[in-house]
Structure formats: C-alpha cells, structure tokens
Image (tube, helix red, strand yellow):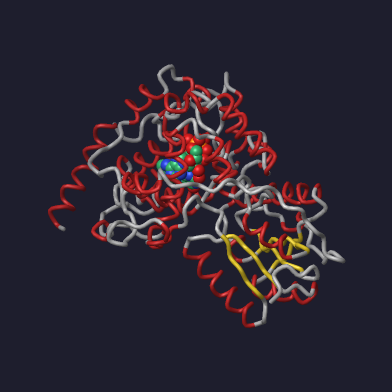
Amino acid sequence: MPENDAETTAILWLRRDLRLSDHPALCAAAGAGAVVPVFIRDALVDAMGAAAKWRLGLSLAAMDAELRRHGSRLILRSGPPALVLEVLAGQLGATQVHWSRLYDATSKERDIRVKQSLRDAGLNVVSHEGHVLNEPWTVETGSGGFYKVYTPYWNNVKGREVPQPLDVPELRAPDAWPESEDLDSWQLGADMRRGADIVADHVAAGEVAARDRLDHFVGQGVADYSDLRNRPDRDGTSRLSAHFALGEIGIRTAWHATGASETYRKELVWRDFAWHLIHHTPQIEDESWRPEWRGFPWRDDNPDAERWRRGMTGEPIVDAGMRELYVTGLMHNRVRMIVASYLTKHLMTHWRVGLDWFAQCLIDHDPASNAMGWQWAAGCGPDASPYFRVFNPETQAEKFDPDGAYRHRWLNPETSVDAAAYFKAIPKSWGMSPDDPYPNRMIPLRDGRQRALDAYQEFKQGA
Ligand code: FAD
C-alpha cells in the first residue's frame, strides 16, 4: 500500500480529537495524501449524556470552521462506523483510514471491530496515540503489571520525555468533497432538558477557545495553581477539562506550556492515570473496583438522591455544587469530591446514581475520570479515600470557601445572577421557585456520618 503516493486519499475518523495541532493521526493522514476528516454519529455518540452531547455539537461546528480556514472541511455521516467508512472510502477511492486511539471498553470493542472489517475490505487502517501523555500499556510496574495507586504511577512517568506537540500539517483537499449531513439536523442538544442558552453563557468551544484558555491560564493562573486549586470561590484552575474531553487541545501542548508547575502536571497525569485504570480494569465503569465492596448496602436511586440532584439537600456547599453543575455543566473538583462523598456516605446512595447524573450533566464528561472520581469518593476504587474518612461538608466549606462567596454565588437568587439562572435552567416539572425558602437539612451531619460508619462496621463484620 503506497504511504506517500500523491494520488492517495486518507480518511481521518475524528472522535475525541477535535483539533488540528498536536494531532499525530492528522499528520499521518496528511503525510499520505489528500485528507478527508469525518465525524460519525454512531451508537456511542447517541449514548452520550445530554450536556456532553450538546457540547459536542459546538465542538464539531468549531472544528469545521477551523478546518475550512485550512482549506479543508468536516464531513458528517451517521451509522455504524465500519459501514460508513467503507462506503466513504469507496466514494473517494480512499485507501487509508486513520484515527486516534481511545481506551474505554466500549470504544475499544468498537474500534477493534471496525479495524478488522475495514482491513477485510482491503483498506489500510492505522490507529495513533495522542489522547494521553503515556498510553496505558506503556507504564508498567517492576513486575510488568499495571498501576493501581497514583503516586508510584506518577513516579514512573514524571521524568519521561514528552514529545513536543506537532504543528498543523498542510491539508490537501480531495478532488471533490463528498456529501456531508447537516449538523443542525443531528439535534445534538435535543436531550438538554435545561436551557442550553443558559449553559452556553459559560462555554467557549473549539481549538481556538482552548488555546486562549490555556494561554490565559499560563499567563495568569499557573503560578498560583498550588495555592488556589482547591478554592471553588477563586478562578484558580485551568478550566480546560471540557476541551481535553473532546481533544480540542492536545495534552502534550498543555504539558509543555505548564512546565512551571509540577502540581499542575500532576493533575494532567491524574487524567492519564484514569485512562490507565479504565484500560486495564474496564469494570471500573460499572462495578465497585474492589470486589469486596460489591455487596455494600448502598441504596439505589431514592428521594434523597433526587433532592441531591436538584440542589435541595439543605447542605449549602453540596447544593451550591449541584446548582453550579446544572448551570455551567461543570463543577469545581473540590466540590465534586464533597458532593460525591455526601451522596455515597451521608445519603448512603450507590455511587452509580451519582456517576449517571454527572454523565448527564457534565460538559467535560469523560468515562475514565468520572468513574475513577466516583470510586475514589465512595471508597471502593483502587486508590480510594477510605470509606470511614467521611468528608464533613461544613468543615470543607469553611476551609475552601472561607468567605462563603461560592455558596452565595449559587444559592442566593435575589443577589446573584448565577443563582437566579439556576431557576431559569431547571425543568418546570421540578416545581421549584426562587421564592421558595432554602430547605432544612435532610439529615443532621452527625447522624448521616454515624449511619454510614455503622453500615461500614456491620458490612466489615459480615464480610
Ligand atoms: P485543573 O485543576 O485545571 O486540572 C487540569 C486538568 O487535569 C483537568 O482539566 C483534568 O483533565 C485533569 N485533572 C484534574 N484533576 C483530575 C482528577 N481528579 N481526575 C482526573 N483528571 C484530573 N474530570 C473530567 O475531565 N471529566 C469527568 O467526567 C470527571 N468526573 C469527576 C467526577 C468526580 C466524582 C470527581 C471527584 C472528579 C471528576 N473529574 C472529572 C476530575 C476533576 O474534577 C476535573 O477534571 C476538574 O475539576 C476539571 O477542572 P479544571 O480543568 O479546571 O482542572
């Protein structure tokens, strides 16, 4: 199969890599000949949570605009990827298909099937690195296994040379562009029960926005990151996660730009660690990672969990976080830990209930970090906070939101635009009004903690 034949047309199948720079698969396709970038609406896209799917639509529009600035364009097709790609290759006379590898079970199963099917059809199929700093199988313990604990994982990778990001290659167009479906007709925002226009105020999608955000953070935030990253009341983190989730900026680009802060690089490596875990232990998405936890008496979905989802628990830092999530599609990491601990411990509710709600509401949803985060908070994950260490939301709030600015921002609709926006965003069926009094606590913190600890004690004795 010719690699650099001027006549060759290569298809670039885009998934969570909606950028032009720092893109090994794009560079390989461009090196082969004319490039046709395609995004396929398949079953995995249909299964995405409401907010992430809506956010994807913005990203696809931005990607098309960016490609057009480079003389290219984004082709949209729907259907099973193997069939779509084979048909498209036939229409174009393309001989090659390239994509960037993903590591969760659903993506891997799909990709293996697609690769086989296209190879059977005589196409040259190549998958590439680029989604993480270090691919999951390249980081091994001394005995050749995978890592279950973050710190030794970090020690293994911290000194590794990370390749410099690749430049945007020159993109040669095919002789004729194939037909594309219309992005609007896909209605990727249809599942958003809340006002997408409210969330849109908090979102800037695409590679240019991601680059701006990174530059802003490098210029103004990275130096104070260690001090401020745990403060939800401050603009102390990079807020790049939604860009990373869809690959609007390369992880190597972020790594090299933020060399001044080891603390920040450690966070980027937490993201890699999540993909490492999901690759080696795919059950992390569905089952308690530690088998001994699978019988823990967590409650399934229940009315308390519904109040948690609606930001109506009466626990201010928890409700502030849940409302931030609903209005912005994001939540500060410290608050994610607090609300997750509260749900799984004080409310004794299964972590899967929380994981599912996050998957519906987060615009930065990624299956690996979400699963790792929930299992960490619930105490059943590989490198988890022990179950008996129950976060006290009140103490956490005093420590990380000392002036109450974050809680005020999300809980006081009379004086805060963001808190008022929450009531415009929520479904009418919830029957909530900004004039309603703020609810009392569902359960005194001490009682909730004790209930969780008693359940743990009993469970351990029975185990
Ligand atoms: P920064 O503090 O600026 O960190 C930079 C980057 O490092 C982030 O963008 C992210 O890619 C990575 N990172 C930071 N902290 C973590 C972490 N704990 N785990 C993995 N990667 C990390 N992150 C997601 O991207 N998607 C999710 O679906 C997700 N679900 C989570 C669920 C729970 C219960 C918890 C506790 C955490 C979850 N996280 C998730 C991790 C973390 O909360 C977010 O990555 C972070 O809040 C994003 O904000 P930022 O970009 O400003 O982060």
Please tell me which residue is depicted at 42% across the width and 24% down the height of the picture.
Answer: 227
Expressed as whole percent of the image width and height from the top left, the position of residue 109 reads 51, 70
Depth order, front residue of 167/270:
167
Residue that sits furthest to the right in the current view? 176
Please tell me which residue is depicted at 78% across the width and 47% down the height of the picture.
Answer: 65
Expressed as whole percent of the image width and height from the top left, the position of residue 324 reads 53, 34
Q: In this view, does 225 lie above or below 176?
A: above
Depth order, front residue of 294/150:
150
Specify the quadrant of the image occupied by residue 313: top left
Expressed as whole percent of the image width and height from the top left, the position of residue 70 reads 80, 49
* Residue 322 appearing in the image: no
Please state the total of marks drawn on the protein image. Answer: 0
Image quarter (top left, top right, bottom left or bottom right) of the N terminus: bottom right
Expressed as whole percent of the image width and height from the top left, the position of residue 9 reads 76, 68
Image quarter (top left, top right, bottom left or bottom right) of the C terminus: bottom left
Please tell me which residue is depicted at 38% across the width and 36% down the height of the picture.
Answer: 338
Answer with left or right where residue 400 lies relative to residue 348. right
Q: Is residue 202 above or below residue 417?
A: below
